[in-house]
Image: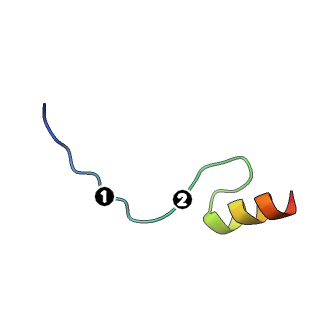
Amino acid sequence: MELKRVVVTGIGALTPIGNTKDEYWNGLVNG
């Protein structure tokens, strides 16, 4: 089994209500 290194460089989510954490949060709060 070969191990691969994964580096996370930021916080992000691709969702229907927003692609950045701020858009996502505004979508959750404002409906």
Q: Position of residue 8 (x, y in %)?
A: 37, 59
Q: Residue furthest top?
A: 1
Find residue 6 and report its horizontal and vertical position in percent. Answer: 28, 52
What secondary structure is found at the residue carrying circle 1? loop
User: At which x and y percent is residue 23?
Assistant: 71, 64
| Crowd class of label 2 (few under 14; some 14 to 19; many from 20; radius 10 Å) | few
Question: Which residue does the numbered mark 1 point to in the structure image?
Answer: 7
- The amino acid at mark 2 is Gly
**Residue displayed at 22% across by 50% down:** 5
**As drawn, 26 above or below 3:** below
Q: Taking 3 as reference, is 21 left or right?
A: right
Residue 5 higher or lower than 3, as above or below? below
Q: Please tell me whether mark 2 sits on a helix, a strand or a loop.
A: loop
Residue sticking out furthest to the left: 1
Task: Give the residue number, with chain letter if any, for mark 2.
Answer: 12
Residue at 86 percent of width and 63 percent of height: 30
Residue 28: mark in rendering:
none
Quadrant location of the C terminus in the rendered image: bottom right
- C-alpha span from label 1 to label 2: 14 Å
Q: Is residue 13 left or right of residue 31?
A: left
Dot 1: few (<14), some (14–19), or many (≥20) neighbours within 10 Å? few
Name which residue type carries label 1: Val
Of the numbered discs 1 and 2, the one sitting upstream in the chain is: 1
Q: In the displayed structure, does residue 18 sit left or right of residue 11? A: right
Q: Which quarter of the picture shows residue 2?
A: top left
Q: Residue at x 64, y 57 (%)?
A: 19
Say which of 15 and 30 sits in front.
Answer: 30
Q: How many marks on residues?
A: 2
Picture residue at 72% right of the left edge, 47% below the top: 16
Q: Quadrant of the N terminus?
A: top left
